[in-house]
Image (cartoon, rainbow, N blue to C red):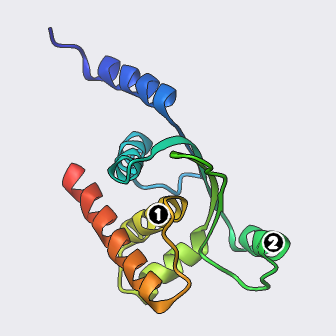
């Protein structure tokens, strides 16, 4: 039996919400459908043997990001992303803050489109929660490679 696309999407959202809760807080900044992003992020976690219990992505301005960086990380610098990882088991829980101006600046700096840079930062946060780090040169190279794999996975799924 065939169902209208809207009904199928509605039930899939309910299924995702029972399985995981992924929220995106932004002022019309995201250029991808949130449902597609949620499926993609869930696939990244599942590929590593994790599920997403609850992850919230907050897209903020530069001032808010600087305040978060100062208050919680004791850094007096601007940054593109801050991930607060509360994961204790194989169920990811995190709060993520992404600076919209830094995302746009990084895209330009690395000759990347804004959409791919957004995907890079979203996957970067999930990868941190999965245990990947970027403190050393080798870790940064591995993180970049995993981010590229994630971006490719998104474009293949589209």
Name the quadrant containing residue 53: top right
Locate residue 47, reporting x and y percent. 32, 51
Q: Residue at x 22, y 13 (%)?
A: 3
Locate residue 89, reporting x and y percent. 57, 46
Q: Is residue 79 left or right of residue 121?
A: right
Numbered circle sitting on residue 67? 2
Q: Is residue 139 visible?
A: yes
Q: Nearer the viewer, residue 80 or 108?
A: 80
Mark 1 crowdedness (10 Å alpha carbons): few <14, some 14-19, many ≥20:
many
- Badge 1 marks a residue whose secondary structure is helix
Q: Are marks 1 and 2 in contact (CB under 8 Å)?
A: no
Residue position marked by numbered label 1 in the rendering: 127
Q: Residue furthest right?
A: 71
Q: Residue at x 48, y 69 (%)?
A: 132
Q: CA distance from mark 1 to mark 2?
A: 24 Å
Name the quadrant containing residue 123: bottom left
Q: Residue at x 77, y 75 (%)?
A: 73
Q: Quadrant of the N terminus?
A: top left
Q: Nearer the viewer, residue 88 or 65?
A: 88
Q: Is residue 134 left or right of residue 67?
A: left
Q: Is residue 135 above or below residue 53?
A: below
């Amino acid at each position: 039996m065939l169902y209208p696309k809207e009904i199928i999407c509605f039930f899939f959202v309910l299924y995702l919400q029972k399985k995981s809760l992924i929220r995106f807080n932004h002022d019309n900044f995201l250029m991808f459908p949130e449902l597609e992003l949620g499926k993609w992020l869930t696939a990244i976690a599942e590929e590593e043997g994790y599920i997403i219990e609850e992850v919230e992505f907050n897209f903020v301005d530069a001032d808010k990001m600087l305040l978060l960086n100062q208050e919680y990380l004791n850094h007096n610098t601007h940054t593109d992303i801050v991930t607060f990882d509360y994961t204790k088991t194989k169920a990811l829980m995190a709060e993520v803050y992404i600076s919209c101006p830094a995302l746009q600046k990084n895209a330009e700096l690395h000759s990347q489109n804004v959409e791919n840079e957004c995907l890079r930062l979203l996957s970067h946060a999930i990868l941190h929660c999965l245990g990947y780090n970027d403190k050393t040169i080798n870790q940064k190279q591995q993180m970049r490679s995993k981010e590229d794999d994630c971006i490719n996975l998104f474009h293949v799924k589209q």
